[in-house]
Amino acid sequence: MPTVSEKAADYLVEPPARHVRLFRNGANQAVRIPKEFELPGQEATMRQVGNTLVIEPVTPKFAKGSKAALLDALKKMQQLGPCEDEFPDVDEGLLPLDDINL
């Protein structure tokens, strides 16, 4: 049985559901997204799955070869962490250069 001094497990906890009101914005139906459900960026995609609306943020696409694309790739690589694999010995099986007489 856990005691008070033990650290609780780090689980991702979803925010509780919120009751929101729908309203009209011209010909469209709209809903205000509460702060705790705010999405990053300026664009999102929406799809309907059964009786549920799924809204997902759009990840920005950068022009190939641009500085922004490079920074985005480096950020993703940093999230992977350090590489623990060792590089292979490319000289394995070759004669040492010092022993060759020309």
Image: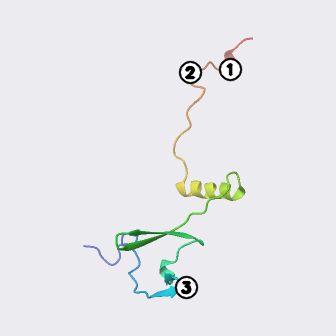
User: The residue under label 3 is which amino acid type?
Assistant: Gly
Specify whether 12 is left or right of 27: left
Q: Tell me if I can see residue 78 in this picture.
A: yes
Above or below for 77 versus 3: above
**Disc number lying in front (3 or 1):** 3
Mark 3 / mark 1, whichever is N-terminal: 3
Binning the other alpha carbons within 10 Å of mark 3 as few (below 14), some (14 to 19) or many (20 upward) gives: few
Above or below for 38 versus 57: below
Disc 1 target residue: 97
Binning the other alpha carbons within 10 Å of mark 1 as few (below 14), some (14 to 19) or many (20 upward) gives: few
Q: Position of residue 10 (x, y in %)?
A: 40, 69
User: The residue under label 2 is which amino acid type?
Assistant: Gly
Q: Nearer the viewer, residue 62 or 12?
A: 62
- The Cα–Cα distance between marks 2 and 1, rounded to whole angstroms, is 12 Å
Specify whether 44 is left or right of 6: right
Q: Position of residue 20 (x, y in %)?
A: 43, 86
Are the residues at dot 2 and dot 1 in contact (C-beta closer than 8 Å)? Answer: no
- The Cα–Cα distance between marks 2 and 3, rounded to whole angstroms, is 74 Å
Above or below for 25 versus 47: below
User: The residue under label 1 is which amino acid type?
Assistant: Leu
Q: Secondary structure at mark 2?
A: loop
Disc 3 target residue: 26
Above or below for 26 versus 46: below
Are the residues at dot 3 and dot 1 in contact (C-beta closer than 8 Å)? Answer: no
Q: Secondary structure at mark 3?
A: loop
